[in-house]
Image: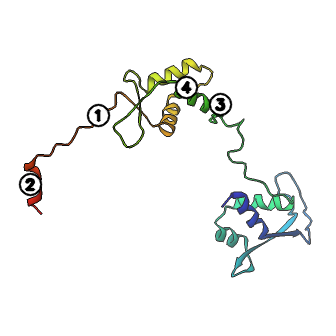
Amino acid sequence: MNVTYQDSYLQCLIQYHAVERHRSRNKTTESTPKPKTYSYEYYVKVSGETVKVCKTAYINLHSVSKKRVERLQKLLVQDKLQKDQRGRSAGSRHNVIPGDIFLSIHDFMKSIPVHEVHYSDTKKYYFTSNLNMKILHNMFITKNPQSGVKYDFFVRYMHENFNIGFGQPRVPRKRRFTKVRSTKHNTKR
């Protein structure tokens, strides 16, 4: 379930109202907490009915943290529901790889000649035997110096998106069964 939907569900089970009576404080300084503005009531759904519970029970029954409940309380008073922003900020994340990098790697791989295996049920392609991952990565960086693609990412992208090996494809050996083997095999049954 999405975090936004969870927050919406949890928020609808919290009600707030203004504090009925404020007590006067003799000494108010910055270190003393401000008087409470709102009072909160917490509910859980049991067999289709809403039952009032304490804050600790609400937290434990829904397996949420105290900080999350306090955040939902503040949003409830403001009449807001904050959407989940995790993974949305492309500008502030340093490990986000732009889509044009993927396209440039893909185009680079398509430009290198490959050999196809003829003796296999699946289509498998091979680079020539003088290439390896390190050489391919260096060729890519030479062709695209502004990309800054690291070797580990390049290797991972290759394995996930291309079914290409290195070296010459091996020709499978034909199985040769002699009559002696077949007769011994048949006699054991």
Image coordinates for residue 34, horizontal then vertical, percent = 86, 58
- Between 61 and 173, the one lying in front of the other is 173
Foreground label between 3 and 4: 4
Which residue is under mark 3?
Answer: 100
Residue at mark 3 to residue at mark 1: CA–CA distance: 38 Å
* Residue type marked 2: Thr
Image coordinates for residue 70, horizontal then vertical, percent = 76, 60
- Determine the residue positioned at 69% across, 70% down: 56
Residue at mark 4 to residue at mark 1: CA–CA distance: 28 Å
Q: Is residue 44 above or below residue 110?
A: below
Which residue is under mark 4?
Answer: 108
Q: In which quarter of the image is residue 49?
A: bottom right
Q: In which quarter of the image is the C terminus?
A: bottom left
Residue at mark 4 to residue at mark 2: CA–CA distance: 55 Å
Foreground label between 2 and 3: 2
Q: Crowding near pointer 4: few (<14 within 10 Å), some, many (20+)?
A: some
Q: Crowding near pointer 2: few (<14 within 10 Å), some, many (20+)?
A: few
Q: In this view, does 49 lie above or below 35?
A: below
- Determine the residue positioned at 65% across, 30% down: 100
* Residue type marked 3: Asp
* Residue type marked 4: Phe
Check disc 2 and report its element: helix, strand or loop. helix
